[in-house]
Image (cartoon, helix red, strand yellow):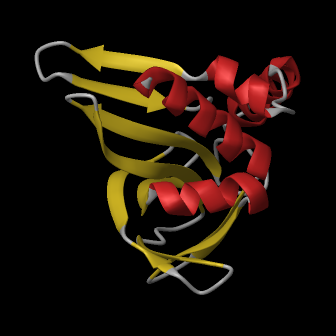
Amino acid sequence: MIINSYRPFSIIITLFAFIVLWGCATPLKTASDVQSGCRLKEDPYEKTTWISSPYQFVFDNPSYLIRVLVKDNDVAFYQLYIDEIFSEWAFIDSAHDIQGRSFDVVEIKREVTQSASVREIVGVELSRNYLDEAAVSGINMKLKGRYGSAIAQVPAFYVKGFLQCVDDYLR
């Protein structure tokens, strides 16, 4: 029997790199932090602009960002972009907030990671009215699929900072 002696070493190096990179990330603490970290991606040919909040890595919950597609200077849609790692495919296809409201879910990407986990990225369609409410109370949402679920929590200051960024762009 041959034992792969490199596997434990590669796991240790990966964990070390993860801890170092996690420690280097600047935590977002205020709406101003979020607003200043927003990114714009413009396409002059299609006359569209994606505005995205900073990607928020969360260790024990889904990671997220909020984004909006602006087309011809009008908002096409808002979306909560959720990125989660599972031990097996969850096939996320529904979302409900803590008040029981349901939201449309769009599959963005599914892939097997290098560590043999599975990564599912989905978009949850949100309205501006909902985001205005969430800028005060935050977002607490359950994402559910045939074989798994996850809880996504987005603080109110994060939503508020994103909306300030969008409003500045649309002025």
Nearest to the observer: residue 69 or residue 60:
69
Residue ID at (30%, 16%): 42
Nearest to the observer: residue 19 or residue 53:
53
Nearest to the observer: residue 139 or residue 118:
139
Extreme residue toward the left, this view: 45
The image position of residue 164, as x and y in percent, is: 62, 32
Rendered view: 51 above or below 91: above
Indicate the quadrant where residue 134 lies.
Answer: bottom right
The image position of residue 155, as x and y in percent, is: 77, 51
Quadrant of the image containing the C terminus: top left
Rendered view: 121 above or below 6: below
Indicate the quadrant where residue 124 lies.
Answer: bottom left
Residue ID at (33%, 61%): 106
Extreme residue toward the front, this view: 171
Residue ID at (67%, 18%): 36
The image position of residue 14, as x and y in percent, is: 74, 28
Indicate the quadrant where residue 20 lies.
Answer: top right
Q: Is residue 121 left or right of residue 46?
A: right
Q: Is residue 72 left or right of residue 92?
A: left
